[in-house]
Image (cartoon, helix red, strand yellow):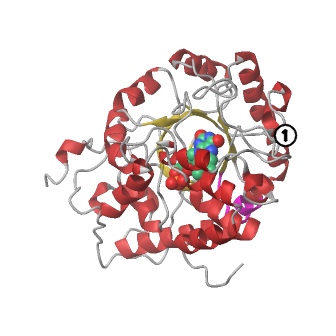
Amino acid sequence: MEQALKTVADFRLAASKVAEPQAWEYLEGGAGDGCTAEENRAAFARLRLWPRVLRDVSEIDPGVDLFGRRHPSPILLAPTGYHKLFHPGGELAVVRAANRTRATLVAATFSTTALEEMAAAVKEPLWFQLYIQPDRAFTRRLIQRAEACGCEAIVITVDIPVNGPRDRELRAGFQLPPGVIRENLRELGSYTAGASHRPISSDIYTAVRACDATWDDIERIRSEAKIPVLIKGVLHPDDAREALRRGVDGLIVSNHGGRSLDTVPATADVLPDIVAALGGRIPVLVDGGIQRGTDVVKALALGASAVLIGRAYLWGLIAGGEQGAARVIEILQTETRMTLGLLGQADARGVTSDLIFGKTVRLRSAKGAGRAPFCASSLGES
Ligand SMILES: Cc1cc2nc3c(=O)[nH]c(=O)nc-3n(C[C@H](O)[C@H](O)[C@H](O)COP(=O)(O)O)c2cc1C
């Protein structure tokens, strides 16, 4: 791995040069014209930070608290499928990168390494991302497996009930190569080496994600699970309120990195309304387009309790395996601490919308109770 790789963007460029072309199209492609994928980045870039001076930043603490556990950094690793497409080390290389950087990894249902094998290698908290399966008894077994191997939370992805139009990967004729197997779903036996991960039964449906999942599934899973249950892929405040009514423990504002439905809003744009809708009762995390420490701190300032990165650590994985993924995470952790220091904000938990120019109305978030609610319509009012 080249020494000259100093930013996440450097890693993207390096990865683009060595990635297997079909895997690259799968990784990079947004849905449709990629409007949302681009907009995720643009929305963070548009926000202007507003620093304060002459505050003691000799000890910067970027840590956050989630579900009773302290995370030394607010950056978690989003669930992403098929790591063996990107590097022969696959998910275990990412687990070791998470160990090195003390980051929490959300293991994907579509991992190419069995969850138990990942859990055996992990030293940091592991969460499990669930795609509700057409067979609900099998879904329950997946959750029980996650609990049995020590996962600390279940993240149910709800934003892709049918396939999105991934034109780039379709054009490239993307197929899972022989030997790259969804290990957690082995029991289903519904695929063969070389079979596409794309729809088995039709253009828009797939046999490995339930298209009939509803809030009742979420409520049932919540009532049966022994660990916190989050839902990932919420963009509408009414859905956030429904999640609260159904007893969900946390929420991830996400548009799947722009890979599901194109032209939905950027996550940074909807985050404040969702935070306001929940009024600090459960933590709200966010992902989509986070590639700089400034993005991380902006997300916290908009009310997020923590953030997740997706493509960024995969670029690291492609460019340099475990070491590359770890380096990308470290770069973002360092930039986050720098950003906090330069803003005059020593403690990440104290970050508020005051740190964003034009958004001085304070957020009520799960990070601190008793602050006045924020709503998008009040932007720039004071
Ligand atoms: C290659 C790839 C595979 C992904 N696989 C999954 C998945 O299996 N489950 C899921 O919930 N999200 C998946 N995602 C979405 C990520 O969890 C996350 O929402 C997204 O990558 C965040 O945006 P970013 O890539 O701009 O950081 C995937 C994303 C990518 C890039």
Depth check: give the residue in front, 368 or 269: 269
Q: Decide whether the magenta segment is chiefly helix, strand or loop.
A: helix
Q: How far across and how far down the image is residue 256, in percent?
A: 52, 43
Query: Is residue 99 on the magenta stretch?
Result: yes
Within-10-Å neighbours for mark 1: few <14, some 14–19, many 20+: few
Image side of residue 378 versus residue 291, left or right: left
Q: Which residue is mark 1?
A: 193
Query: Is residue 127 on the magenta stretch?
Result: no
Tell me, yes or no, if residue 325 can be seen here: no
Q: How far across and how far down the image is residue 137, in percent?
A: 75, 16
Quarter of the image with the C terminus in it: bottom left
Which residue lies at the image location 49% right of the left edge and 44% below the top edge?
A: 31
Residue 156's quadrant in the figure? Answer: top right
Depth check: give the residue in front, 377 or 319: 319
Task: For ligand 1, tell me if the residue under mark 1 lies within 8 Å.
Answer: no
* Residue sitting at the far left: 381
Image side of residue 56 versus residue 6, left or right: left
Tell me, yes or no, if residue 257 can be seen here: yes
Residue stretch rendered in magenta on the structure: 96-104
Q: How many marks?
A: 1
Which residue lies at the image location 57% right of the left edge and 79% below the top edge?
A: 6
Relative vertical location of residue 190 with respect to residue 312 in this rendering, above or below: above
Mark 1: amino acid: Ala
Depth check: give the residue in front, 231 or 41: 41
Quarter of the image with the N terminus in it: bottom right
Q: How far across and how far down the image is residue 265, in percent?
A: 36, 43
Residue 355's quadrant in the figure? Answer: bottom left
* Residue sitting at the far bottom: 4
Which residue lies at the image location 38% right of the left edge and 68% below the top edge?
A: 345
Badge 1 element: loop
Residue 343's quadrant in the figure? Answer: bottom left
